[in-house]
Image: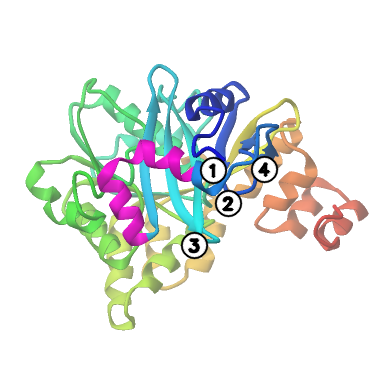
Amino acid sequence: MSDRYPVPLDDLLKLLVRHEGSDMHLRAYEPPVFRIHGDLRRTNFPVLQPEQIKAIVYEIMGPERIARYERDLECDLAYAIKGLARFRVNVFRQQNSVGVVMRLIPIRVQTIDELGLPPVLKEVAMLPRGLVLVTGPTGSGKSTTLAAVINHINESKPVHIITIEDPIEFMHSDKVAALNQREVEMDTRTFADALRHVMRQNPDVILVGEMRDNETMQLAITAAETGHLVFSTVHTTDAAQTIDRIVDVFEPERQEQIRMQLAVTLQAVISMTLMPRADRPGRVPAFEVMLATPAIRNLIRERKTHQIYGMIQTGAELGMQTLDNHLLDLYRNGIVSFEMALSKSSNPSEFAARVGGGQRSEELMTAPPGEV
């Protein structure tokens, strides 16, 4: 068996783009698998052998990343096909062989309007300072959303933007703003290392690709506290959970201080999910939008985050919206199915009652997995 796979990597990725896929999975003893509009689909190409996957990824990794992978058994990098797209690559170990997932990143950064993002994001992008968090599960579109926000700032304000990413995903070029993009383990050791030194780089806007640990969280909050506009992501599903998750990461004796800092610095939490469309092929995002009003800042201080949802419900005139209200709009406009909207709802019983789904709604909520 040859170490070289009969289908070149670039040809596989070109096919992924042609079929409007988002991810490609390579693992031993399986053919390449594409994720298209949210669903995994096996291709008809030959089964991959362990040595073939290793040859594919080692060719694009280079000596430093190969050494890092063999030391840590994990490695993130970016790969580009000129004129087509960039790809975020995660190389990992599974069952004693190499596994790979490659995520498509379009070359052109889409605008807030093109992506159908909440219009209030344009106002959030123009804020002079504070912490803005985009949250959601893996693959929900957080990076795409932040890229659109950074692009809006880049087109609108003569500011210095520094991004810290692992790896760099969307490539930005200077427009009205000046941009520096730094990649973890290539341009800096860690997110925390980059944040410790970022104040000396005269930034106005800072993008932290992900807040993975309490040190990064503390430094990001401090940067927002000292007059910078800071964007980052967290793997949480709504605003209240996001605040609680950040506070809970810290030692008990520090939690009150972090809560007070968040009450002052937090400007907005945008929580999102992606769903298959019902009206045509593709996926559509749904959002919860929380803006830090004085009332919400008080709830954060007073440890009453469970009441934030009610504040979001009554804040529509300010640009806030609950996830369930957005899901209801998408369903009523025929963009997503009732079943899909219900599965993403934060309160399925209430959502079903608002739709008037009746008995079918109850069946959906109680059916065993795989029988809906």
Three-letter amino acid code at the position of disc 2: Gln
Three-letter amino acid code at the position of disc 4: Leu
- Helix, strand or loop under label 3: helix
Q: Which residue is mark 4?
A: 327
- Residue 52 position in % (x across, y down): 51, 41
Q: Which residue is mark 3?
A: 240
Judge by depth and name the residue closer to the eye, 84 or 148: 84
Q: Are the residues flagged by discs 2 and 3 in contact, CB closer than 8 Å?
A: no
Q: Are the residues flagged by discs 3 and 1 in contact, CB closer than 8 Å?
A: no
Estimate the spatial distance between the alpha carbons at disc 1 and disc 2, rounded to whole Å: 7 Å
Residue shown at 53% from the left, 45% from the top: 139
Q: Nearer the viewer, mark 2 or mark 3?
A: 3
- Helix, strand or loop under label 1: helix
Q: Nearer the viewer, mark 3 or mark 1?
A: 3
User: In this picture, which residue range is highlighted in magenta?
Assistant: 53-72
- Helix, strand or loop under label 2: helix
Q: Which residue is mark 2?
A: 313
Residue shown at 36% from the left, 69% from the top: 301
